[in-house]
Image (tube, rainbow, N blue to C red):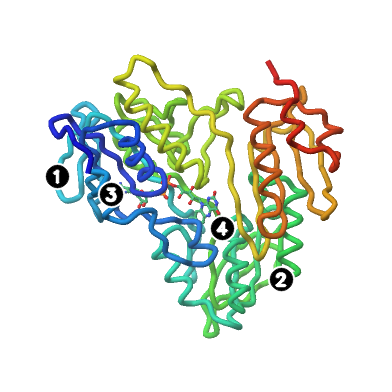
């Protein structure tokens, strides 16, 4: 354990997920020698495997936390923030004074607006365990919502021999954040792997029957299932901030250094909404594993920056996420919704790399889906171009013979 200055007031973190845990370790790496207290209702574990393999994978064990001098209050819920008194209130009655407080409370699964039958959601390990126990060869699984988590789960259930149907209200899969062309590649993969995809139809009701669940669809038909899962998005966990009078708006509102509207209170990860310097300060709320880690590290620097003369740079990490469905991986870098036009490169292996350009030609997003790890290198290079605000020649982007590395020498926007 590092030499610790236990007399100084603690930095307190709420939420031991990807963001909060990374923040705790980053504080030590950045040289903070005072107390760090991590408060979590759950242990620190990875969520991405829950919808893929179902594996329970810890981010770190208790030994790593204590070696770094991080006090972990496990199974404890933070119930209130006294912003004037600089103290966090816990469900066991304790009050924790803080020097700085980081809210890394994540998000919770959105529920369907109606009952009628048991419906699974997938956010926590407990959710995944309950769901996995129901999946077996031949079982009819209905996934409501064609977003990433629903589709990953559809692929996992199909691999386990289930008969899977995905019902999506929008006209296509992954309408939020993935370009249509790339989503179509994944849709094709699902269909080839035997998943029944039904877009453009909503669920209007559920009823439990002797043989399972009847799902009524807006188009007037019905679907029979043994297991129903809702993958209809996540809601940021802002209740603590809201009750403390901290500004929230579909996320805890923070600046580009993760500072909230309350003094010495920060928020980061899935729970926060922050202005992105690469996208004209547009307020973003991401649900991304890598962003959660980067936010945690950046928030740690920002909390320490309060005592430094040098100041702290605004966080400008390029949004990035991946999704594994069947034997394909999808990756998106940047913000597809910021693109005004698209350019597609068709590689000799048939994989399409999608580029999104803003008015003026700046590259603002890239996306692709393909077998295994086949799209990773191109998306990594595109990500570097996005970070540099490059304005590459569209003809070069479209040309599979032109190495993307050479495009890195493109002019940079003012
Ligand atoms: C099933 C699934 C699959 C995913 N797959 C991918 C993927 O393939 N690629 C990708 O990029 N991203 C993926 N993600 C998203 C990624 O996991 C999240 O973006 C990331 O976990 C967010 O980290 P976080 O720390 O902000 O929030 P969380 O991981 O939600 O952690 C927040 C923690 O805070 C705790 N907490 C909340 N309130 C309190 C309180 N008052 N007191 C104490 N503790 C509290 C919660 O219990 C939770 O443990 C996936 C998410 C899920 C659910």
| N-terminal-most mark, 1 or 2 | 1
The local secondary structure at tag 4 comes to: helix
Q: Nearer the viewer, residue 272 or 219?
A: 272
Q: Which residue is mark 2?
A: 193
Residue that label 1 marks: 94
Q: Which residue is mark 4?
A: 149
* SS for callout 3: helix
First in sequence: mark 3 or mark 4? 3
The answer to whether mark 4 is within 8 Å of ligand 1 is yes
Residue located beneath label 3 in the image: 65
The label nearer to you, 3 versus 4, is 3
Label 2 – label 3 distance at C-alpha: 42 Å
Residue 65 rendering spot, x and y as whole percentages: 28, 49
Q: Is residue 266 above or below residue 180?
A: above
What's the residue at 76%, 69% (across, down)?
A: 192
* Mark closer to the observer (2, 4): 2
**Other-residue count near label 3 (Cα within 10 Å), few / some / many at <14 / 14–19 / ≥20:** some
Where residue 151 appears, x then y in whole percent?
62, 61
Crowd rating for badge 2 (residues with CA inside 10 Å; few <14, some 14–19, many 20+): some
289 lies left or right of 40: right
Mark 4 vs mark 1, CA separation in Å? 36 Å
- The answer to whether 272 is drawn above or below residue 200 in the figure is above
Q: In the picture provided, is 55 more to the left or to the right than 245?
A: right
Where the N terminus falls, by quadrant?
A: top left
- Is ligand 1 within 8 Å of the beta carbon of the residue shown at mark 1? no
| Relative to 350, residue 252 above or below | above
Dot 1 crowding, Cα within 10 Å, few <14, some 14–19, many 20+: few
What secondary structure is marked by label 2?
Answer: loop
Tell which of 12 and 147 is nearer to you.
Answer: 12
């Amino acid at each position: 354990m590092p030499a610790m200055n236990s007399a100084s007031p603690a930095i307190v973190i709420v939420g031991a997920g990807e963001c909060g845990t990374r923040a705790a370790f980053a504080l030590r790496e950045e040289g903070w020698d005072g107390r760090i207290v991590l408060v979590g209702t759950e242990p620190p574990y990875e969520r991405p495997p829950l919808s893929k393999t179902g594996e329970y994978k810890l981010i770190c064990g208790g030994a790593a936390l204590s070696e770094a001098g991080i006090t972990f209050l496990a199974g404890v819920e933070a119930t209130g923030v006294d912003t004037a008194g600089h103290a966090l209130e816990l469900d066991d009655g304790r009050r924790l004074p803080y020097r700085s407080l980081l809210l890394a409370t994540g998000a919770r699964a959105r529920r369907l607006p109606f009952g009628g039958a048991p419906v699974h959601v997938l956010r926590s390990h407990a959710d995944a365990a309950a769901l996995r126990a129901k999946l077996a060869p031949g079982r009819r699984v209905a996934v409501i919502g064609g977003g990433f988590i629903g589709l990953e789960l559809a692929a996992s259930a199909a691999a386990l021999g289930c008969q899977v149907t995905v019902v999506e209200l929008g006209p296509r899969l992954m309408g939020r954040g993935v370009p249509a062309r790339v989503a179509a590649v994944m849709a094709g993969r699902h269909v080839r792997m035997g998943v029944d995809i039904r877009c453009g139809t909503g669920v209007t009701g559920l009823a439990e029957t002797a043989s399972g669940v009847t799902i009524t669809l807006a188009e007037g038909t019905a679907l029979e299932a043994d297991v129903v899962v809702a993958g209809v998005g996540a809601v940021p966990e802002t209740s603590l901030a809201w009750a403390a009078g901290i500004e929230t708006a579909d996320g805890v509102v923070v600046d580009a250094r993760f500072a909230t509207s309350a003094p010495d209170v920060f928020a980061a990860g899935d729970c926060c909404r922050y202005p992105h310097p690469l996208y004209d300060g547009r307020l973003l709320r991401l649900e991304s594993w890598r962003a959660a880690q980067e936010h945690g590290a950046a928030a740690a620097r920002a909390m320490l920056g309060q005592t430094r003369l040098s100041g702290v740079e605004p966080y400008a990490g390029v949004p990035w996420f991946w999704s594994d469905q069947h034997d394909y991986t999808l990756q998106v870098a940047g913000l597809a919704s910021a693109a005004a036009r698209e350019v597609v490169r068709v590689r000799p292996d048939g994989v399409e790399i999608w580029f999104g350009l803003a008015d003026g030609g700046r590259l603002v997003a890239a996306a692709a889906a393909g077998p295994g790890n086949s799209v990773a290198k191109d998306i990594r290079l595109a990500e570097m171009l996005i970070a540099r605000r490059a304005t590459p020649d569209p003809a070069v982007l479209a040309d599979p013979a032109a190495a993307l590395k050479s495009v890195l020498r493109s002019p940079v926007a003012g």
